[in-house]
Image (cartoon, rainbow, N blue to C red):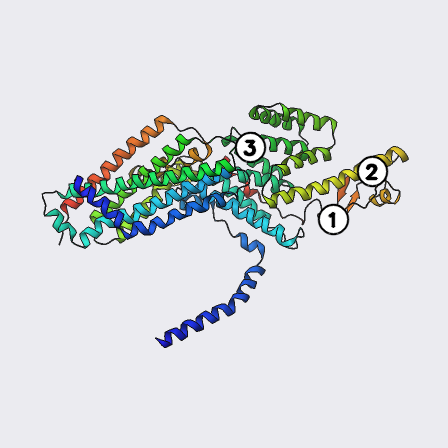
Amino acid sequence: MKNVAIVTLKGIFRDRIFHGILVNVAFFVLIPSIATLSMRQVTELSLTLSLSLVSFILLLLSIFLGGTLLWKDIERRYTYSVLGLPLTRGRYLLGKFAGTAIFTLFVSIVLGVATYLVVSWVSIIYPPERAILWGNLTVCILFEALKYILVIAVAFLFSSVSTSFFLPVFGTISIFLAGNVTQQVYEYIHSASGSALSPLVCQVAVGLYYILPNFSAFDLKVNAIYGIPISLSGTLLTFVYFVLYAAIVLGLAVLVLSRREMR
Amino acid sequence: MNRTIIILVLSFVSYISILGAFSRYMASRPIAEKLGYVPSVEVVKAVSADQKELVSAFFVTKVLLYFGGLLEKQQNELPIPPDYPAMSRMIHGAVQLDPYNMDAYYFAQSILVWDVGKVEIANELLDYGMRFRAWDWYLPYFAGFNHAYFLKDYAGAARYYEQAGRLSGSDLLKNLAGRYLQESGKTDMALAYLYAMEKGEKNPAIKKSFRTRMMAFQEVRHIEIARDHYRQTIGRLPATVEVLIQEGYLRTPPVDPYGGHFYLELDGRVATTSKFAFVSTKSVGKKNKVQGAH
């Protein structure tokens, strides 16, 4: 499994998709000048733009790498040679996932450093009224990485089922969008306005809330941008949620791939 | 191959030939059209996924660029009414996406209050913002000013100024508020506020907006001084501003930078036909109340 992870990691660095997405890093250079459009919160806007860019790059990587890595191996029949080795399909999938997850963490660290540099530079020129909490920024970027690792896990689950890249890519995009809105829907149906909805709609919404990944839990951008304290217990709980949810999704993916007929 | 090159060259030449007309069309499009349409905030929230803060910043920047472009383009004469309701909708959308976005509150206070006269809507926004930006003394400071100057609710103003003083760690605001309310007239109070705002502003469009208003209020102050001088000397209020000029109480005719004419109300209050705005404002619907606050 370790070897699969290492090979996956090396493969990603040579992947054209990665090279294409890497071009977006150049936008970091523009952030200090765009941030000056703000009237009263230049540093906060630079943080908003930097974190959005980090999030966007990680989203592209997780969807396109997560959604195509496994599918490409199956499509190009690389899996036959790999699975001919004394390696179970489950370990193969987990190895690929581990390689992609480590890569995501690595990219997050690099993008995090770029964010630190940009925001430090802007804050020297336009000192913010409220001190930047660098710890919050670090936790925020870490949780962004965890969120996109979870997205990769979802993409792997779709890849284990699908024979083309459409389901892994578009299915993951749909789950990502839905997973970002479930909390909002859940709160709405439990508010006074939600009482007008039919009980069936409410039950379906609550069901989806528990089934779909809750990505909004990983979003700590507001805490990083405006220096709002982060709840320690909340982050620990979110981390446990991440571990358990990823375990379930990967478990399902292993189960499906193990039973899949490959021709 | 040759045919491809010919088609390519023809396309390129045609493209160059329409560029002028295209640019002119884009420049002549109604400005309100350029601000665009804001879809339902709930839809934007769902679609923006984890980029709500970015979309909020985008909304505010769009309004700011629209308003700045309008000021620059029309050189302070606005034949096309600014689309204030659309601006208000965008600002409200922005704070619902990111309730911490200070630029949105600041823009609302700078433009919605002065140019549109929607003080209640601005105060609602400020109250909403105070629930999130609990550390920020600017929001209660703005609200205090609105209550004192526009609504003449001095008790409410004192409460907000006290809050601003507590948050800023200085009694200065409380003292200033007291002094303005007791010793100075309304115009002095507005001038002092505008001066402080203009000094701390770096955005050229907003700075210009403050300067124009200060110029107008300075003219009002000159007329007020001349009016009081006339009343002290003659024993009654002057009938018109022109009387003050003719009888030498005002050296030069006052100029309203908004394009209006100053006149005296029956009670002697100085007013202008422009109502201190470039154009008459459209109504900003009640729909713009911060839904997220309820």
Left or right of A96? Residue B216 is right
Read off the residue under disc 3: B127
Left or right of A50? Residue B61 is right
Is any part of residue B244 visible from this angle? yes
Of the image marks 1 and 3, the number of the one nearer the N terminus: 3
Distance of label 1 from label 3 (alpha carbons): 34 Å
Read off the residue under disc 1: B260
Q: Nearer the viewer, mark 1 or mark 2?
A: 2
Read off the residue under disc 2: B226
User: Which chain's residue wears label 2?
Assistant: B
Distance of label 1 from label 2 (alpha carbons): 19 Å
The reply to whether label 3 and label 2 mark residues of one chain is: yes
User: Pointer 3: residues within 10 angstroms few (<14), some, or many (20+)?
Assistant: some
User: Pointer 2: residues within 10 angstroms few (<14), some, or many (20+)?
Assistant: many
- Callout 3: SS: helix
Q: Nearer the viewer, mark 3 or mark 2?
A: 2
Task: Give the image location of residue A203, x and y in percent.
Answer: 33, 38
Which image quarter is the N terminus of chain A in?
top left
Of the image marks 3 and 2, the number of the one nearer the N terminus: 3
Q: Nearer the viewer, residue B224 or A126?
A: A126
Task: Give the image location of residue B33, x and y in percent.
Answer: 55, 55
Q: Are marks 1 and 2 in contact (CB under 8 Å)?
A: no
- Callout 1: SS: loop
Taking the spot 52% from the left edge, 38% from the top edge, the residue there is B290
- Callout 2: SS: helix
Q: Nearer the viewer, mark 1 or mark 3?
A: 1
Q: Are marks 3 and 2 in contact (CB under 8 Å)?
A: no
